Amino acid sequence: MKKRYIKFALLGLLAIGVSGCKNNKNQTVLTREISFKKEGNLKLVRSTNDSLIATLDIEIAEGEYETSTGLMYRSSMEDHQGMLFIFERESPLSFYMKNTQFPLDIIYLNEDLQIVEVYRDTKPFDPTPLPSRKPAKYVLEVNAGLVAQWKLLPIDRAEFTRINP
């Protein structure tokens, strides 16, 4: 009798714990926050006079899974951080904000790391495509409002270095 009561109580606790991890469509929801992993440093440089605009810690996305997921499912990012996407070759690219929980500025860069397109203050969870109008090889995502704060120009450029793990 006592063993039966303990099993019943444990099953009840398990059911309560599992139901706390479900959303209203009865699907399991990921509750662990994905943390930022510093993999390099990036400098934004004013092309007209080579002055430093900003320095960022960057996380690098270059594999298929990393580039397709990016900052999705994260709740925030510090202003001194960014995510740099690296693609194999320069081509027209398109990003969207589906499953991205906070607004971003999206900066497309060509193979010479010069800015070719910027989207400011993108809307969280918006599936609308945000295409580069010119070929790009890199994409930098930073918190919304930073492009305006830095007064970033279409002719400005970036420089980045990787750090050893």
Image (tube, rainbow, N blue to C red):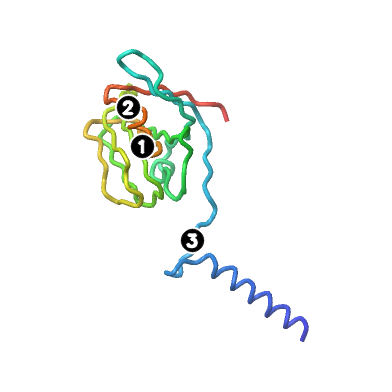
Residue type (three-letter) at the residue carrying disc 3? Val
In the drawing, what numbered circle is on residue 29?
3
Q: How many marks?
A: 3
Q: Are marks 3 and 2 in contact (CB under 8 Å)?
A: no
Disc 2 is placed on an element classified as loop
Q: Are marks 3 and 1 in contact (CB under 8 Å)?
A: no
Q: Position of residue 78 (x, y in %)?
A: 48, 38
Mark closest to the chain's N terminus, 3 or 2: 3
Q: Position of residue 91 (x, y in %)?
A: 27, 32
Residue at the disc numbered 2: 151
The quadrant where residue 88 appears: top left
Question: Height in image: 72 above or below 52?
Answer: below
Mark closest to the chain's N terminus, 2 or 1: 1
Residue at 46% in and 66% down: 23
Q: Quadrant of the N terminus?
A: bottom right
Residue type (three-letter) at the residue carrying disc 2? Lys
Residue at 32% in and 44% down: 122
Residue at the disc numbered 1: 145
Judge the density around disc 1: few (<14), some (14-19), many (≥20) Cα neighbours within 10 Å: some
Mark closest to the chain's N terminus, 3 or 1: 3
Disc 1 is placed on an element classified as loop
